[in-house]
Amino acid sequence: MAELSSVRLVVVDDDALVREGLRLILGGAPDIDVVGEAADGRDAIDVVMRERPDVVLMDIRMPRMDGLAATRRLHERGTSARIIVLTTFDTDEMVLVALREGAVGFLLKDTRPADIVAAVRRVALGEPTLSPSITGRLITMATRQVDDSRQRAARTLIARLTDRERQVALAVSEGLSNAEIAESLHLGLATVKTHVGSVFAKLEVTNRVQVARYVHDAGPEPGS
């Protein structure tokens, strides 16, 4: 995928200090242009539709309209902006809902500045980003108890995958990016992207956390 010459970014958070900090962190990157900000979801919709950014950093808990409702309404309006949810996670148990509303990335608010910049770049290029710590905790929230029927359903889906696709699905479930999977499995990046696309299609999912949930639900292969 061709690189973007400049990533247009909108920052949404009800805390003015957080917005300023993110603006300083991201505005300092030569290839990221902070084109707008908003203090709540309602204003975020207006700013995003007006500025047409590539990426939006979206807080969840805000007055007037929260980030989940704003994400849903932006997708209903057909925005092409890719939304990264900002969360403290210890209190934001609505993160799973954000996946269904169309978020493509998750960042903890205490993420290192360099990692925030890297995440925005990856998402701008079309690659969802989930840190390993967030992936693990999302799975824990979503799969506190796996019953037999869920395990059977997950194993039926996982059985559709080739051996290589299973390796890729496992790596996805561990929170690895496409580049990290390529390095781990000694594959080309384009090959990994093809395998990830095939995994999504065969498991009938739309994001990486759903892949992780099926891998978790299926558990180890019988006899392994």
Image: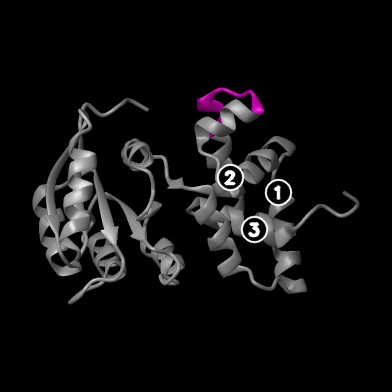
Q: Is residue 82 left or right of residue 12?
A: right
Q: Residue furthest right?
A: 223
Closer mark to the observer between disc 3 and disc 2? 2
Mark 1 against mark 2, which lies toward the viewer?
2
Q: Which residue, given by chain and number where applicable, does mark 1 sit on?
A: 160
Camera sees residue 17 = yes
Disc 3: which residue: 214
* Most common secondary structure along the magenta stretch: helix
Q: Are marks 3 and 1 in contact (CB under 8 Å)?
A: no
Pointer 2: residues within 10 angstroms few (<14), some, or many (20+)? many
* Residue nearest the viewer, comparing 58 with 152: 58
Disc with the residue nearer the chain's start (3 vs 1):
1
> Which quadrant holds residue 168?
top right
Q: Given the image, on which type of amino acid does mark 2 rest?
A: Val
Residue at x-position 53% and y-position 62%? 138
Q: Is residue 183 magenta?
A: no
Locate the N terminus by quadrant: top left
